[in-house]
Image: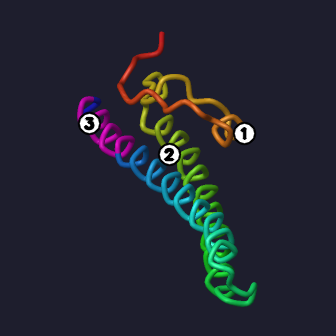
């Protein structure tokens, strides 16, 4: 039964890491789009009002993605609690899982292999 729980937890962990990476990539892509739009308009000698709605849309999208990032971090924390509830608290799915504040500023990709804590 423990083996089945570990296999299930591995599947969930892999998908969680993929979701976190996808959200990070989306935040980055939309932020880059938001940054390039006003500069491109300026280079094309366009009036500031041209594309303003598009710029606002991109900014709002970026804000919503950052909110989604916060929610996936909360999901991660909830899954960590569930891990304990199913008796896998000694299993570390991503190396050291730092506190939520540290994860927000993490620049190094998490390790993606299963390790057993002593």
The picture places residue 6, in percent across and down from the top left corner, at 31, 33
> Distance of mark 2 from mark 3, alpha carbons?
15 Å
- Residue 81 is one of the magenta-drawn residues: no
Above-or-below relation of 3 to 30:
above
Q: Residue at x 44, y 54 (%)?
A: 22
Left or right: 3, with 61 as reference point = left
Q: Which quadrant of the structure image shows residue 60?
A: bottom right
Residue farthest to the right, as pictured: 48
Q: Which residue is mark 1?
A: 101
Quadrant in which the N terminus appears: top left
Identify which residue, 44 or 26, lies in the foreground. 44
Please give the label number shown on residue 83.
none
Q: Main secondary structure of the magenta part?
A: helix
The picture places residue 53, in percent across and down from the top left corner, at 66, 88
> Distance of mark 1 from mark 2, alpha carbons?
17 Å
The disc, 1 or 2, on the residue closer to the chain's N-terminal end is 2
Q: Residue at x 61, y 83 (%)?
A: 54
The disc, 1 or 3, on the residue closer to the chain's N-terminal end is 3
Q: Which residue is mark 3?
A: 7
Residue farthest to the top, as pictured: 118
Q: Which residue is mark 2?
A: 79
Of circles 1 and 3, the one toward us is 1
Q: Which residues are magenta?
A: 3-14
Q: Secondary structure at mark 3?
A: helix
The disc, 2 or 3, on the residue closer to the chain's N-terminal end is 3
């Amino acid at each position: 039964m423990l083996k089945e729980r570990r296999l299930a937890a591995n599947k969930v962990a892999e998908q969680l890491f993929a979701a976190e990476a996808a959200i990070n990539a989306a935040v980055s892509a939309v932020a880059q789009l938001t940054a390039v739009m006003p500069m491109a308009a300026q280079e094309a000698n366009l009036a500031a009002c041209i594309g303003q709605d598009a710029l606002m849309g991109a900014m709002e999208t970026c804000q919503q993605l950052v909110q989604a990032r916060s929610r996936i971090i909360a999901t991660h924390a909830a899954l960590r609690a569930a891990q304990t509830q199913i008796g896998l608290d000694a299993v570390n799915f991503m190396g050291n899982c730092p506190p939520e504040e540290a994860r927000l500023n993490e620049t190094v990709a998490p390790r993606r292999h299963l390790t057993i804590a002593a």
